[in-house]
Structures are given as C-alpha cells and as structure tokens.
Amino acid sequence: MARRRIIAGNWKMNKTPSEAIALCAELEDLVKNDNVDVVYCVPAIDIVPVAEAVKGTNVKVGAENFYIEDKGAYTGEISAPMLKDAGVEFVIIGHSERREYFKEDDAFLNKKVLKAIEAGITPILCCCESLEQREMNVTMDWIRLQIKSDLAGVSADQVKTMVIAYEPIWAIGTGKTATSDQAEEVCKGIRELIAEMYDQATADAVRIQYGGSMNASNAAELLSKPNIDGGLIGGASLKADFGQIVNA
Ligand code: 13P
C-alpha cells in the first residue's frame, strides 16, 4: 500500500520572524514537489509569519510544541486551538529534547497526542533511544514502551492519520546518522507494534519518519527503505539542502 511521503523540517529554536520569512522565500522553489507532504515545524513566534509566507505554496505549517489545556491561566503557554486557528496542521510531540530538557514524560505526552487530535492537528509523535540503551540492546523495548504509553486511548482511525518519527538521540545533531539498515529495523519494529496494538490496516496507513543527521547526501538511501516514509530534519532544514531532501 502506497503511503504518501512526508518530509518535515524541525527548525528548533532557530530563526527570528524576519529570518523565517527570508528562509521561506529561499526554499520556495527548491521544495516544490506535488508527490510529497512538505512541512515546516517552526518556533511559535514564527508560525503566523511563516503561514503567511507559504500561502499558495505546497508547504504546510507545523508547530514544535503546545500546552495540553485549551485556555486559561498558564502564563507563557500556547494551546492547540490557538495553533489550529493560526493555520498549523502538524505538531511535534515527544521530541527527545523536550523529554530531556523539559522533563515531558509519556503520561504527559499521551495527553498532548489526544489534545492535538481533538484540535484537528496531526501529531508527529517522536520516539527515541540513547546510545547506552542501544548498546544494552534494549532499543526496541524502549521504543515500544514510549509508543504504547503515548498512544493510550487513541483509536485506530486516529492512528492512521498520524506520523511517528524515530529519532535515535545519538544521531541528533551529531552528524552520526543511523545506517539505513538500523533505521529500517526500528521503523519496521514500530509498524509491527502498531499492527499488534491495532491491526494491519492501521500499521499500513501510519507514516513513519526517520530523523537524526539526515541530509542531502544520505536522504535517498534512508528513504529507499520500505518502512521509512519520510524524514524529520533538524540542521539541514535550515538551508537549501532541504530542497534536495524533499526531492530525494
Ligand atoms: P538533526 O537533523 O539536526 O540531527 O536533528 C534531527 C532532529 O532532532 C529533528 O527533530
């Protein structure tokens, strides 16, 4: 079954609003491709200007974070309905940087997944393992635990529309990419888990990305694997290389 490819940039804490507008203009022609979903997940303050800058193009806007309540006394936070109203279609949930630096645990991430879906925003649910876990041979146990907890209460029909991103922590921003076989092994394991938790049709529909030092030179090889449907790209999403990844 053919799954539509999805290449998403995770800009992380980079680009001021004016720099963001300039990057959208620089990338506009380079990321044109009707066969792929192209998403820019941008810092909250860039969402409105980026949504304006990509209007009429093939690029969709994503967010990097939000809080689980719809509104109220949560100084400094942004809600899922606010994102939706600003034009956000995707949101990253469970990135290892949020798990580590902001202590977001799986119970909280589960609430975020449910809230994003309720608001009509597609979650890009990230899962990861550390280098120690990989060396101890518990990668798949760890990944399964995260996904099972994060998807509690999510229906098969909802999972079918979701994106899951496998991002080994040791490959993020290190220049050390997982080999395509290592990435495929885990992405395949994730699909098998979804089949186990739901059914084969759900597993066949969910899109699974790889993320971690993906760039213009390794993208084609990673994307050639049967269970890798796209990429979640950090550093290389901030430059012209992103266009090459989209077209890989
Ligand atoms: P890099 O592509 O910079 O390794 O980052 C990957 C990532 O964390 C995307 O979410």
Image: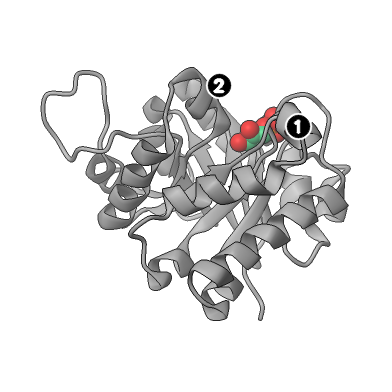
Q: Are marks 1 and 2 in contact (CB under 8 Å)?
A: no
Q: Where residue 47 sits in the image (x, y, percent)? A: 40, 35
Pointer 2 residue: 14
Q: Secondary structure at mark 1?
A: helix
The residue lying toward the viewer, choosing from 92 and 36, is 92
Quadrant of residue 78 within the rendered picture: top left
For ligand 1, which image quadrant applies? top right
From the viewer's perspective, tell me whether residue 223 is left or right of residue 58.
Answer: right
- Circle 1 crowding by C-alpha within 10 Å: few under 14, some 14–19, many from 20: some
Q: Where residue 160 sits in the image (x, y, percent)? A: 48, 69
- Circle 2 crowding by C-alpha within 10 Å: few under 14, some 14–19, many from 20: some
The amino acid type of the residue labelled 1 equals Ala
From the viewer's perspective, tell me whether residue 52 is left or right of residue 199.
Answer: left
From the viewer's perspective, tell me whether residue 206 is left or right of residue 62.
Answer: right
Give the vertical position of 178 relative to 12 (above or below).
Answer: below
Give the vertical position of 20 relative to 85 (above or below).
Answer: above
Q: Secondary structure at mark 2?
A: loop
Q: CA distance from mark 1 to mark 2?
A: 19 Å
User: Looking at the image, can residue 28 be seen?
Assistant: no
The amino acid type of the residue labelled 2 equals Asn
Does the numbered disc 1 mark a residue whose Cβ is under 8 Å from ligand 1?
yes
Q: Residue at x 72, y 25 (%)?
A: 173
Checking the image for residue 171, the label placed there is 1
Q: Residue at x 42, y 29 (%)?
A: 104
Checking the image for residue 90, the label placed there is none
User: Looking at the image, can residue 102 be seen?
Assistant: yes
Mark 1 or mark 2, earlier in chain:
2
In the picture, the quarter occupied by the C terminus is bottom right
